Every structure is written in C-alpha cells, then in structure tokens.
Amino acid sequence: MNSMRLIHVLWCLNLYVTCTFIQVSSHECVYPAIYNFGDSNSDTGTAYAIFKRNQPPNGISFGNISGRASDGRLIIDYITEELKAPYLSAYLNSVGSNYRYGANFASGGASICPGSGWSPFDLGLQVTQFRQFKSQTRILFNNETEPSLKSGLPRPEDFSKALYTIDIGLNDLASGFLRFSEEQVQRSFPEILGNFSQAVKQLYNEGARVFWIHNVGPVGCLPLNYYSNQNKKKGNLDANVCVESENKITQELNNKLKDQVSQLRKELVQAKFTYVDMYKAKYELISNAKSQGFVSLIDFCCGSYTGDYSVNCGMNTNLCTNPSQHISWDGIHYSKGQTN
C-alpha cells in the first residue's frame, strides 16, 4: 500500500475540476511550464544542492539520488506526471538542469515568514529568485543565444500560461510550536497571511494567472511532534496519537488561509485559484492507517529520535525493510513507497 495514494487521488480530482473550470473548451489540461514554491514537501533538490541535505537513503524508492526529503516521489512529482511534464529541476541545482518546462524554487526548511523556518529561502526570497530567473531567461532567450542553450530555457510567452504551485507554511507552525507558546503562534497568523498574500500578488504582477495552493497538513501528527511535545502525558493526544492542540491551531490557520485565497480571487480578477485541502487528505490517511495496512504512525522508517527535534536518518542509521508500510519516512516527511 502506497502512503501517497489517497493524496494522489485527491490531486487528480482537483486537477480535473481545475481543467474543466479554466479550459472549458478543451478536454485536456495543458500547461507549458510549472513553477513551484514551498518547503521540503515539494523541494526537488535545493536543500541537497546548497546544504547537502537529503542524501541517501533518501531516494531509495525513487531509484537514484533524488534530492528529495523522502524515499520516493513528492506531490509535485505526481503533478508533473499527471500533466505529462518532466520532473522539476531545482532553481539552484546547476548540474543536469533543464528549465524549459518550469523550475522549482522550494527549499527544505523554508517558511512563509522570514526567519520562521530552518532555511534562509523563505517564500518572499523564492519569489525574488523567480523574478530574477524570469528576467534573465527572457534576456537570454531574446538575444543571439546558442540554440542548445535556448532549448533549456522557458519561452517568454509561457510564463503567463504556466501553473504556479505553492506548498508552504508547515515550518512557520512547527518552528513556532518549538519556540513559542501556542497563543504566540496564533498571534503570528496575520504576518503569515500577509506575507503569503504579498508573494501571490508579486507573482500575479509577473504574469502568473493559474495558482494551485496547498494548505498545511496536520502538524500535530508529525511523529517528531509526538516525541517532543511536553504535554503528551497530559491528555493532549487524540485517538491517532496526534497532538490535538497543534492540529486545532493548524486548522485555524488553514481556515484563514482559505479566506485569504477567496479574497485574492476578488482582487486578482484575471487569476484562477485552486485551494487543495491537504490537511483533510493526510489526516484521513492517518485515521485509516491500520485498515490500510500501515504500522503505527509514530513508528517512522528512517532513523530514530535524537531528542532535539531531529532524527539521524543517514547512511549509517536504522532503516526499515519496507517504507511502503510506514506513513512517515523520517518523523517529519511522508513515505512514498514504491514508484510503480
């Protein structure tokens, strides 16, 4: 059983609705490029290229050194497959990259608000990188550039026709729960939503018109939160051994994010937005873990808890024999099972 199956089904359903809504004259949803922004849930190589993270055994179900914080594919990989596009190269990955069909600006540890996560590449900086990328590739494409180089660059007209995907926000909460009280985390919501809205508007001003936005998954269900939460012995866990108070705050932020997307629909009249409820998909997966053939949620596949909100998932560490039986790969990221 693949732990991404339920989420993949949700993606396909939403993709069908989006294509029907946006391109009513066509039965096929076609985007010439995909530009992704986010954290480790959709990072395909930034953290690997810059910080030497996500080294083996990450990628063992993918079949190569994937640069992903998982054993296999990420949701963004399923999106590119569904749209019959190549996997996205990380913007900062200089080896073997082709950007004709888009680029990935996501970075493991990234947050919406500057300084809130574990990476300097917050959402605002990722958008700045995109703007620089767009400007430079337009200059190169329009000048007398070698055909071989031009073939790896996006066509200038494709930026306004591309799909813009955003999957970020988990680290704003996870880091906040570690450093501050839950009340302080809630008080950060206006800043989180303000930075998110500003990033979307900047992309819109650069020509982005089709947005695919994920809400935040159940932070309280991360195994590391179970082990690090100081209240787990005080009745703060739900029936799925998730930290209930953290999930309630996550749902509160998601509700406000949904309202923010509705407001953006009114303001950015030429844009189309799809808001994807990843929280519901992931929590349903966790709730049905036993019937789906998974081991306990808190029993992750790679490494063991070290006591400082990290695990020692690396070449010389404990590794489960079958990742597809585990919902969690390393206590933070989801296991993807086999690629077939």
Image (tube, rainbow, N blue to C red):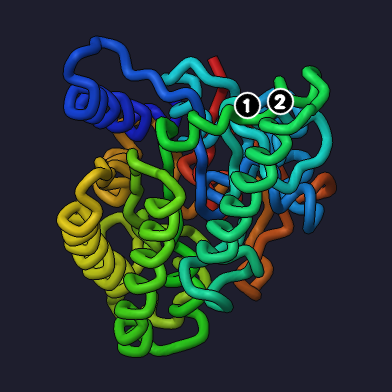
Q: Which residue is mark 1?
A: 100
Marks 1 and 2: CB-CB under 8 Å? yes
Which residue does the image show at 34% across and 68% down from the upper left?
243
Q: Is residue 325 above or below residue 52?
A: above
Q: Amino acid at mark 2?
A: Gly
Q: Residues within 10 Å of mark 1 (few under 14, many from 20)?
A: some
Numbered tag placed on residue 152 in the rendering: 2
Numbered tag placed on residue 232 in the rendering: none
Which residue does the image show at 69% across and 49% down from the upper left?
46
Give the quadrant of residue 320: top right
Q: Specify whether residue 13 is in view.
A: no
Most foreground residue, 73 or 231: 73
Q: Is residue 208 above or below residue 227?
A: above
Give the quadrant of residue 28: top left
Q: Is residue 99 above or below residue 126?
A: above
Q: Quadrant of the N terminus?
A: top left
* Whole-percent x, y for residue 313 in the image: 72, 52
On the rendered structure, is 217 left or right of 142? left
How far apart marks 1 and 2 lie (CA) works out to: 5 Å
